[in-house]
Amino acid sequence: MALDANSSESPALVQEGAVARFFRATEIDTRMLGMIAAILVVWCIFDIWSGTKIANEGLFGGSFLTPRNLWTLLVQTASIAIMATGMVLVIVMRHIDLSVGSLLTLVATISAVLQVQHLGPALGVGHWSIWILATVAALSVGVFVGACNGYMIAYLGIPSFIVTLGGLIAYGRGIGFYISEGVTIAPLDKTFKIVGGGVPESWLGPFWSWVLAVIACAAIAYAVYSGRKQRLRFNFPLRPMWAELLITGLASATVLGATHIVNSYPWPPKLIEQFALANQITIPPGVENRDGTGVCMAADKVVRCVDGLIFYTGYPVPVLIALAVGLVMTFIATRTLFGRYVYAIGGNPEAAELAGINTKLMTVKVFALMGFLAAVSAIVASARLDAATVSLGDLNELYVIAAAVIGGTSLAGGLGTIYGAMLGALLMQSIASGMQLLNLPSAWQNIVVGSVLVVAVFVDQIYRRRVK
Amino acid sequence: MKKTLMAVMAGALMLGASAVAATAGTVAVSWKTFQEERWKTDEAAIKAVVEAAGHTYVSTDAQGSAQKQAADIESLISQKVDVILVVAFDSDAILPSIQKINDAGIKAIAYDVQFEDPNALYITFDNVGVGRLMSKSVLESGHTEGNFAFIKGDKGDPNATFLFQGITEVLKDGLDSGKIKNVCESFTDGWKPDNAQKSMEQCLTANNNKIDVVVSENDGMAGGVVAALEAQGLAGTVPVTGQDGDKAALNRVALGTQLVSVWKDSRVLGKQAAEAAVAMINGTAIDALPGVTKFKDGKKGVEMNSILIPPNPITKDKLGEVIAAGWVTKDEVCAGVKDGVEACK
């Protein structure tokens, strides 16, 4: 991103076209733009295609571009996206972590066993403190195991590939299996489940979603403003005013658009009915078909006939967690000393060490951070499934690495962005979800996702060569 | 000499004499791996029957290696055991070892995993039957028409296909007449519950929640399906099938979010296999064993004598059976159950 923008600046020598001038002025990462375009194209194709099978309310008459599907898509992406943000830093530092999926299984198993077999019986099922203890335990295990990985890599000098390959074999299906005895641990604590996004309690609702969106827009405006002030202070070249406004506008529009979409997905009718029953609200006459199959899905109709009994979901908790992780990780990567060190080490480990960076400690920290994120994903994934199983994290490491790489992280180290990896995760899940929506054989899903990975890296390399 | 004596003994047994043999024999088991929890249950059942009949039980663990299993079997042959139960790690690679068993005049039993040798006895659960039972339970619960979703297992596992054969066989009339519509059908990589959850979410989206029945090929995936249904408030109204008798699944059956878990009680399998082994020591011919039928649905179509044990579909009103059998505790099955489930009272 910023790096490429700088390297492309060989002023005056190259005659810039209007498009190049535009991108230079706005400093928009063209690679990110490409990924977003790819995602949008995939979405449109799936919507049109699914529309030819069953007509629905999507933008092009299909099922893909409906609030419901996009909402589900975000939830499905959350777990991989969270881990992908950490994998970026690991890969940027010229390491790899193959153990994240296995660690996810281990963490999920430990927290589930703790909830179901120990805390539940001891404190009483549903006790308020269960989810807190289970979460703390999960995060601690994640950080600890991650730090151990890092220690072995940094201080014992074992290559990260080997350490984490060992972890891949040992954690989930080794230690995890030993702890759970291979049994599915379910159901989980009711409060803990909120993190998974499958229950109404985990939906923010339209009001708070809008509040959040407005805060986000304000934050964007402030970030642009303070960025400009900083540049003025240090006499850096400024973006033209129109570019500043355009970026603020585009970013805010994206936030508001996304909020509008999640706020247009109504509660499933059955849940509205259950809610009405539980809260002794009489459902007004006029809604005959409440079996989850018809009328109630047409949002406008329900609004008219059951005033007050239509609820919209808003942002689900797992998506909020993923977004928060993305924000914090972007801040860490681009705005902190820690982040600078990571990229410096990735760019040239020897130089970084000579410059006085404690590269060994940094390695431990980055792997501990990765472990922490794997634990967050474990909480999200197990809460969503409402169970911990021995296969929960299987193959996740590959999807996480693929997401980071599709998102532009270079396996040679030194390059990679957090948002790129998250978009990579979204692209992969879009393809998988779309193909499931079309009921295509899963063999095809594997073929397509595998091909996308290779093609994405190929396109990325062409792009980099041209930029140079 | 010993064999003649045994034949005489067997004759006596068949006339209803005591099951204690004068000459104690040895029953051996070559396990493919002992890492999975379930085999311990099988072993306990086998051991109990063998030792009650006055014979000796020995076993080897191939630790998931075809080579180790071949060596294990050679060592069992040289120990001059009478019957070897083989849980084959690789059903083709095992065949030379089976030939050696035959050559040594020892009886072989294919336990749970088939290898195709006409001299051996094949004893297993009726896997096609599991699929049939899933469909039957659905039909018997009154769901005879509408949109059916099929969540199949891993595409690399032949069992997923066997199961699906049985499932569609029973639903054939409905599918042919169009009363039953197959609206979603997907394999699930690695039988992973979270993959099944995603498939189900997409299936519900594609069909606007118009799903009447979900046939899931095992309990783990049924868990993912129920989680997806729950998020739409449909858990408990849409019947979901499964198999394995998982604790969590039996709990769901009690809670009403899952219709049936087809249960393959490995103790029944172990007991029947051990009884067959004891009868074989006593000289009973394989095709004269109780419950033996001809089976030739294997890969190569070799006809074998086999005992196919019918699995037990556990629905809400049969939960008492799994509790009584000691498979799960009442607390495990009944956790969170509020309304009147007979077994939880």
Image (tube, coloured by chain):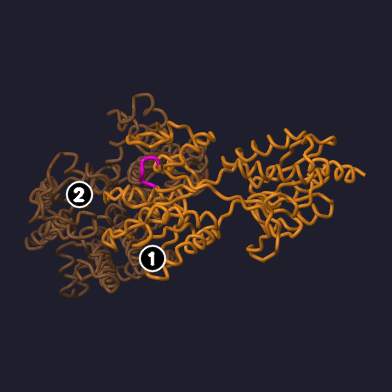
On the same chain: label 2 and label 1? no
**Is residue B256 on the magenta stretch?**
yes
Residue denoted by label 2: A315
Q: Disc 2 vs disc 1: which is toward the camera?
A: 1
Q: Is residue B33 left or right of residue B220?
A: right
Q: Is residue B207 above or below residue A86?
A: below
Q: Is residue B172 above or below residue A278?
A: below
Foreground pick, A442 / B237: B237
Q: Is residue B287 left or right of residue B226?
A: right
- SS of the residue under disc 1: strand
Give the residue type at disc 2.
Answer: Tyr
**Residue at the extreme top:** A122
Residue denoted by label 1: B182
Magenta residues? B254-258
Secondary structure mostly taken by the magenta-highlighted segment of the chain: loop
**Is residue A177 on the magenta stretch?**
no
- SS of the residue under disc 2: loop
Chain brown in the figure, letter = A
Provide residue A306's location: percent of width, then percent of height: 10, 52
Q: Is residue B23 left or right of residue A387?
A: right
Image quadrant in which you'd find residue A63: bottom left
Foreground pick, B215 / A96: B215
Chain orange in the figure, letter = B
Provide residue B280's location: percent of width, then percent of height: 78, 46
Q: Please, which chain is the residue tagged with disc 1 on?
A: B
Give the residue type at disc 1.
Answer: Asn
Q: Please, which chain is the residue tagged with disc 2 on?
A: A
